[in-house]
Image (cartoon, grey):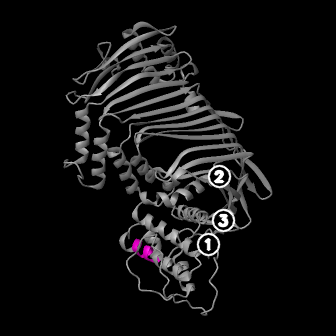
Amino acid sequence: MGRGAAAFILVAAAIGGPMAAGAADPAQTLFSEALTLTTKARNEPDAVKRADMLRRVIGNLDKIVAEHPNTKLAVLLRDGKPIGAFERKQVEQLLAETGVQTAPQTAPQPAEPPPVQQTSPQIAAAPDAAPEPPRPAHGRGLPIDADPTTPTGQMLSDIAVGIDSFLATRTVPFSPSVREPLRAVEQGDRIVVQLRGFQVEMGSARLEFGDIDVGVKRLAGDTGYVVDFKVPPEVAMFVSHTQKLMSFTIAEGSASGTWRKDLGFLTDGDLDLTGLRARAHKGDAIIDICRLDSLKGRQATKEADGTLSMTSLLEINSLLMTPPEPGDPRLSVKRVVIGSEGRGISVETVKRLQDFGGLQAIGAMQGEAHSALQFLDILAQAAWDGIKLHYAVDGFAFAKGAQTVLSAERLALDIGFDNKADMAAVEVGVDVQKVTTALQEVKQVPDELLPHSLTVSTRLDRLPAKTIAELGKSWFQGETGRTTAAAPLSAMQNAVFEAKPELGIKTLAVAAKQAQISTTGAIAINPIAKLMVSGGFDVQVVGLDLIKARLDKDGATQPQLAEMVPVVVGLRGLGEPSKLGDRNAHSYRVDINTDGGITINNTPWETLIPKKRP
């Protein structure tokens, strides 16, 4: 269902790729520059300039192997393997075709060299030969049909290079191609980029997007682009030259966004898709496997005083996933909402986040160590005030055959991280409503006592997140780094003990038809406590009488249940009568004391545990 939107990601990455290359690792930057020069060389009419660019490409490749030998790019280049649409031997062939004598290779030069003075070019052609006209790209890749020295041609070149660079440098390289060279049609202050027959190969598979028209408008001051386009009505996946495996169609779809060069990401965007279908193709049979009424995405960014605040929202309506084989499980969801909010984020932090989790990082060739260190360094040093994440699923049902195995009216998770003060705070909320199940393992619990709802709201205060991240980075690197701690793991533990984080439970409620538990309270790290924590909770329980009755009934045949009867009787005797809503309840105060003792209404909890008979 996301294949239609994939074209938007490709174009966004293509436009932003060359601008964001500086945020990537050095090998990646050198390779992106090599791709840029290769595409420009292919469209350069002057043979001497073309040869100069290609020599610089080879210089960049040699530099990757020599100076960054442990990167995946270096390994592929050293082994002579293609990187997506790029192959070194194609560059060498292009260089040989120029007919310009090879100059001694010097140290790699910048990707954008000054104009080459053509004082005495050595061209293998007749002295009176006419200048060589612009020619399309050789070999694989995305050619352009425009003069690369004009603003429009430069933009087309950037897009062609960006798509090549983005796809070729993924963990699983992709190879893009078009039926015709990229063209641009000017419409006032807007340029429409035409991709005809756009397709992407990945191993033996191929994705066909068809014809795509992308509208591009430069922002004032050349600070970025506004991009918009109609999502292709069909994207097809082939596993051979003619064998179609799957197809993805939409009734209508559009996407738009604003790309900021200085930030290297989409600051504002809109995505609207309706009538999405995914179908599997088996011979002459076409089988619906996924149906989606609508998918809407929004992103907005506000900038003030050098910081950014960003909100994003993704909404999916009426999702139905059906298996291609009869009898396999199927999934239906009425609505899915995914939202995020970031506040007080410095511009520098945003740039670093793009390297870690932006468009350029999607499937990129970066090791786990690099990603982990990036993440820890952002937590430890970067300036950002906080984030909020929201996930909600309404009307969830998982069925097999005619039976609904599991369903829920609502499943929701909220996470908030406040990083503004020296000590961080984390909030977590869980909301699960009206769960039903047909699983036999669960059916052993009486229906009236089977929990169907869960509500949780907690907050962890005084969390030394920045210190822990800094120490974690030191531990990960196997050295102390910028800290004075000789043992980072021990230092983490000490930092937590010194901060004394406190976990507060605003709400923890579990409900069944005839039973309910509600809890509030807090516990905190306490270095002088025997259990290292101390605090307490107020608990209310509804349904103890019913629980005892069921244990009495079922305990006759299940000895393990009979052993629980004294515990329930003891709890009922300790409880203070109270009300939970309009229902009768028993109330308890649970305390975790510094001496390690746990009491329930001032009674040691172990007295409730029945002693085993000898």
- For badge 2, the amino acid type reads Arg
Q: Which mark is residue 286?
A: none
State the residue position of label 3. Answer: 182
Residue 68 seen in this snapshot: yes
Helix, strand or loop for disc 1: loop
Q: Provide residue 491's location: percent of width, then percent of height.
A: 23, 43
Decide which of tag 2 and tag 3 comes sooner along the chain.
2
Pointers 1 and 3 in contact (C-beta within 8 Å): no
At horizontal 56% and vertical 31% (from top left) the residue drawn is 411
State the residue position of label 2. Answer: 3
Q: Residues within 10 Å of mark 1 (few under 14, many from 20)?
A: some
- For badge 3, the amino acid type reads Leu
Left of 245 or right of it: where is 597? left
Front of the two marks 1 and 3? 3
Q: Which mark is residue 140?
A: 1
Left of 364 or right of it: where is 188? right
Magenta stretch containing residue 34, yes or no?
no
Q: Camera-side residue: 180 or 590?
A: 180
Q: Residues within 10 Å of mark 2 (few under 14, many from 20)?
A: some
Front of the two marks 1 and 2? 1
Instruction: Please give the range of residues in magenta.
Output: 58-64
At horizontal 59% and vertical 78% (from top left) the residue drawn is 45
Helix, strand or loop for disc 2: helix
At horizontal 70% and vertical 46% (from top left) the residue drawn is 253
Instruction: Indicate whether 375 appears above or below 166.
Output: above
Q: Residue furthest top?
A: 577
Decide which of tag 1 and tag 2 comes sooner along the chain.
2
